[in-house]
Image: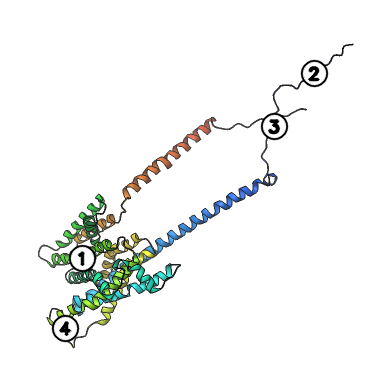
Amino acid sequence: MNKLSAKISPSSGPQPVTLHLPTPASEKDPQEQPLVQDERDAERPSKRCCVRCRFRAVRKVTCGLILGACVAVSWAWGTNSAKETLKRHPAPFFIIWFCSIWNILFFPLYYLCHLLTEKQKQLPTTEFRKCSKFLGEELTVRVVLKGAAPFSVLWSLSGYLYLLALRRISKVDVSAVLCCSQAFTFLLSWIGLKDRFMGVRIVAAILSITGLVMLAYGDGFHSDSITGVALGVGSASASALFKVLFRKRTGNVQPGPASVLLSCVGLCSFILHSWVCVLLYFTHVEYWLPSQHIPWDKLCVMASLLLVCNVLVNLGGMFTYPSLISLGILLTIPASAAVDTFVTETLQMSHVRTAAAGIISSGYLMLQLPENWDESTLRWLSTLWRGNWREDSIVGEENVMDTAGIARAKPKPAVVTFN
């Protein structure tokens, strides 16, 4: 009897589709939860770092605005004290010699800032040797005087011409003329140090020279304005030559070497320039009677204010951005005008002088632009064009597709399986 055997093979039909529903957080795999937690912990330090960077930037900007205002106020007040001192004691070289001696305090003030800002404190002698490497390896009195003597001559010459100019023109005009020192510094750096040529700075230098001509001939061709502006230009040129020679000697100007150099300038003024004061006194160029009272109070106020201004300009970069300190130098023009208006009540500004001060201020602001400002501006514009505008257009297209129902996702149907 033949047995019939039947083989049953599994059906080759479509497999059942399983519907995967979202699982709650409590039912997830316990091995996946630590991974998510680690990713969140890794993102937290970056966020904290961004918050700290923003806080530091805001703090530096706030400090820069305060220091810039202090620069403007100290310069305007010091210029007013210099004007009053010249009226009571007309001896400009003696006055600038007395003020230059106060520069000896530069390095002690820098070392105090070093103790406040640096985590690794060093001894004063170690810090002085570190900051005075541009003078030479062996520091002796002869080496210090030889290295700082040319800078001391330029410093005294600039201050002496500044006081002579202050005799003939107003404090506002003197402040405006000295703002042109930045343009002279650029021209000398371009010629002597082979700095990068920038067309915008050439335009700024032309604007500064135009403002000087307008100031010189603001009161006519036969006035003291021409002589006063010429003396102010000489002071600004000596100051610019001081900065360029210092850059050539040390490279990039840093607060430490600058404080050492200015302290040496004060020492040179005390040792080397004292005989010039004696010579001018005995030749009756700057002569006063022995019984005449010297206004030491005005001299001390003027010297301390100019010292504060120079300290903020040269050491303010340790606390804030140097561009904000430069903005404070520009603010000396309105600060001097405010002192003339509310303190001495002698402000006389014609339309020509106001326009000249505005032109000089515009040139000064253009000189503060960085070297790669054009590339940064073009990069920012290209980023704005490719980033924000294209993203806005893409978002708009997606919204249109979503409203048309083309890009809308369809839900998958649930399949019930029968065994």
Residue at 26% from the left image edge and 66% from the top image edge: 337
Of the pair 198 and 353, the residue shown nearer to us:
198
Tag nearer the camera, 3 or 2:
2
Q: Mark 2: which amino acid?
A: Lys
To which residue does mark 2 refer? 7
- Tell me, what colour scheme is on the image? rainbow
Q: Secondary structure at mark 4?
A: loop
Residue 221 position within the rendered picture, expressed as x and y whole percent measured from the top left: 10, 62
Tell me if label 1 and label 2 are in contact, CB under 8 Å. no
To which residue does mark 4 refer? 288
Tag nearer the camera, 4 or 1:
1
Tag nearer the camera, 4 or 2:
2
Most extreme residue toward the bottom is 291
Q: Mark 3 to mark 4: distance in Å? A: 109 Å
Residue 184 position within the rendered picture, expressed as x and y whole percent measured from the top left: 22, 59
Tell me if label 4 and label 2 are in contact, CB under 8 Å. no
Q: Mark 1 to mark 2: distance in Å? A: 112 Å
Q: Mark 1: which amino acid?
A: Ala
To which residue does mark 3 refer? 18
Sequence-wise, which precedes: disc 4 or disc 1? Answer: 1
Which numbered disc covers residue 238?
1
